[in-house]
Image (tube, coloured by chain):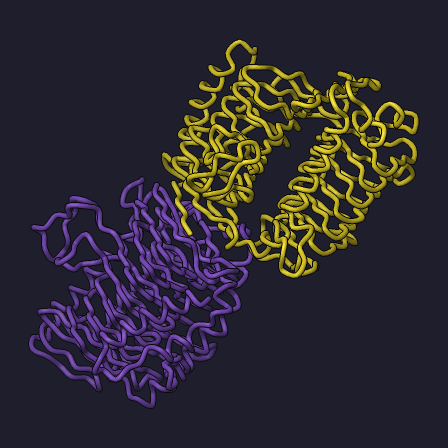
Chain colours: A yellow, B purple
Amino acid sequence: MDRLKQINDRVVSRLNTNLNGLNFDAEPFVSKAVNYENMLKFYAFYGITSHYPIFFDFRHSNISGSYFLGKCHVDRSTIYKSDIRGDELKRKGDQIDCAKNIPLVEDEVITIRDSLLYKTLVHSHSHNPESPEEFSIKNTISAHYSNIHGSTLAGCFLGPFATVDLMNLHACIVGEFSYIQAGELFHQKIAPGTIWVRQSAFEFTYEFDKVVLNKYVGIDSEYQPRGLIYDFVTLKEKEYERLFDVVKLAPVEFPASSAVNRYAVVKGNTCIGENVLVAQRAFLDNAKIGDGSNAQEQSYIVDAQLMGMNVTAHGAKIINARIGVKTFVGFNAFLFGKENAKIRIGKGSIVMPHTIIDATEPLYIPDYHLAWGYIRSVKDLKTHTISFAALEKIKDGISIGKMKFTGSGFAFVNAKKARINQILQANGSFFQNEKNRGHAQDGQNISFNTLQPYSTGDNKGIYPSVRIDP
Amino acid sequence: MDRLKQINDRVVSRLNTNLNGLNFDAEPFVSKAVNYENMLKFYAFYGITSHYPIFFDFRHSNISGSYFLGKCHVDRSTIYKSDIRGDELKRKGDQIDCAKNIPLVEDEVITIRDSLLYKTLVHSHSHNPESPEEFSIKNTISAHYSNIHGSTLAGCFLGPFATVDLMNLHACIVGEFSYIQAGELFHQKIAPGTIWVRQSAFEFTYEFDKVVLNKYVGIDSEYQPRGLIYDFVTLKEKEYERLFDVVKLAPVEFPASSAVNRYAVVKGNTCIGENVLVAQRAFLDNAKIGDGSNAQEQSYIVDAQLMGMNVTAHGAKIINARIGVKTFVGFNAFLFGKENAKIRIGKGSIVMPHTIIDATEPLYIPDYHLAWGYIRSVKDLKTHTISFAALEKIKDGISIGKMKFTGSGFAFVNAKKARINQILQANGSFFQNEKNRGHAQDGQNISFNTLQPYSTGDNKGIYPSVRIDP
């Protein structure tokens, strides 16, 4: 236990050095977030399939987390409840999107050194042309339900429910419930509730009202989460325990072209279509998951229908809602319909990451619309949605309510559409006649291996160093 | 699955080469013993504590077995349901019993190369002066419920319920239910039901009547077990399933000085004393396990009382019996008392390994007696027991019934007593005031790590290669 604390302390002090000047102390966050006694009761596990090349190598590490799927390498580090899904790692000879002339000289690996990482999901589509063979994280703390999606990171702190998407972050602090997709950032502090998408052709920003945000996601003085969204997920936590308590589960019914992860909760009258991916720690209750759809890690789909080809990104929550064909619901979006105030979204629409729709009356967002921000009523829809047709016409910029858009609307819509297609492709939504395999097919029949820490002695709380080759 | 079969086939052909001339074909045995489809459903696990130095290193291996506790190294090999308990491995600088002038230059490791091993328990007190740092097994098949206790082995076949104790075996076949403790043997075939203890000062032999043996332990044409003892253990098999199905078990009550392995069955009105070791896969039902006693791997103690300081060796079965203080019940002994034909054994006595006592009437073996062979009635006791007092007087030899003893009775009794003391010492039976720790203390709080094989692809049925350091 002392050793476990030592590992943490050393990394925390490095993190504080990196974040020097940004007025942040990691120590109280870590000591409050981690119950050392409890960590003895956890076990870690990693998934293995024949489809992803593995090379796990944990050293002097403490891993209470789970599910490293694909090549890996961790050094003297604490992980903890983390997913880290290496299923989109590139192989030797592959090219990266933004640097077609740099084929990889080796298989890409995930490398996490000296590191500390808390409750992080990390997903593996990296894109940093400076280190194409290495997906790298060091001394990073990500709080409850934050997402690191691809990419390089270093001494950073991500607040609860924060998302860093397709970008490189160096010594930054990202406030709670902020969504950042902004290329490369050095030594910055991002205010809570900031939605910021920046590419060369456009920029999209939205900032949540502080009072509103505080109702849904807030933090206390030690950066621990609170608020309505946190309460929602906390209430469901108990349902996961069963998955971790037994070795073999009663099987869930689903077609042979689909994958339902063994660590997903599936309950109620749930129906799963063809080519569907239900990822680890997804939560389905009275859900229809139409053909080609996916429910990504820590997404919640409750009393809701996805009509088909739907992307439900990491941490998205869809309650009392009906989502049209090929509609995308972004990271940590909170679609909170009620029995008497259902949410309906037409086909081909996009709900921006970190959108909160907390319906007080029935709401309908038509086909091919973009939705963002904070929506409660039909009236709010006017200032928080725009049709693709209108958006595509924007050449220089537009402000609608608190949303500010600059650059080419056409480029924005097309970039989003391309990304959705890429996600569906990667997830195996287009699988047919043994072609277009994706995670829905390759994520079937995962073997899980579990580790427990030493329960006594100097190494109490520490896992042995483990190396696993194919 | 093909790869799994390939690994087996290659080792089987090496084994057959080694056993050339002994009229044995391993192939049908292996193909009958192994259900490849089932092996996909198993998981392997290994135990880790702070007390035993670990260095697991499995390569290209298939391990459906469990519980490598202590340094290890396996090569391109199939293990399968095996225990292999490395908790008595010697450390650098230690000396071995039979060669005091050879201190170990490195920690002893268990090394199993190219190997195949089936349902084997191996326990780790090795004693081969030729390789003090290496406890080594290669291309060995041990059938259901056979015991390899310490030592070097090579291309050997051990039949069901056979035991090889404290000796080195090279290219040998040991028949079912034979117990051999005979130094070094090369290219020999041991007939079924042979009990053979040989040391420089004495030799003990007993051979079971073929018809009797066939009733209790027999084999079919493919070396698969049958008979009353096999039926007994088969009936209990279902009780173990629960242990493997859940991650956390409801705790069993026992004193802080004792260890009850998480993979032991403990049921009925069972009471566990101080300094007790209940090992993995031991089976206790309505059992009193007195202070300082142990129930070793695959021992069964049902409706029985061990009064204290009792050794119940691997595979021993004690049913409807009352065993006096410091009485030893050897490997695979079958003490089958009945409700109306209970077995009572006094204090300080020794029941030889592989003794069958199938009581048809109440039976009493007095204090300080040796018992062996096949006992059913009070009448049988005359030809199958001797008091230590009488035995100690034997200088040259004695034959009693089918038992033949040559050499010094005094040396025999003392060697046995010394070994029992050594076993009690190793098991922590004398633990007091934090002194004399043994397996009962060091076997507490074992962390278990589990592995599953690939479930699809070329490696179907094969486990990834794993290396685990402290």
Kindly give the residue lying farthest to the bottom in the view shown.
B211
Placement of B341 over or under B127, stated as above or below: below
Q: Please report the residue visible at 47 percent of the width from the left and 48 percent of the height from the top.
A: A53
Q: Position of residue B125 (x, y in %)?
A: 24, 57
**Residue A141 occupies which quadrant of the picture?**
top right
Q: Is residue B298 left or right of residue A42?
A: left
Placement of A121 over or under B220, stated as above or below: above
* Frontmost residue, B315 versus B312: B315
Image label count: 0
Q: Position of residue A149 (x, y in %)?
A: 60, 33
**Residue A445 occupies which quadrant of the picture?**
bottom right
Q: Is residue A321 left or right of residue A261?
A: right
**Residue B216 occupies which quadrant of the picture?**
bottom left
Q: Position of residue B174 (x, y in %)?
A: 26, 77
Kindly give the residue lying farthest to the top in the view shown.
A21
* Frontmost residue, B266 versus A186: A186
Q: Position of residue B444 (x, y in %)?
A: 40, 47
Quarter of the figure that contains the C terminus of chain B: top left
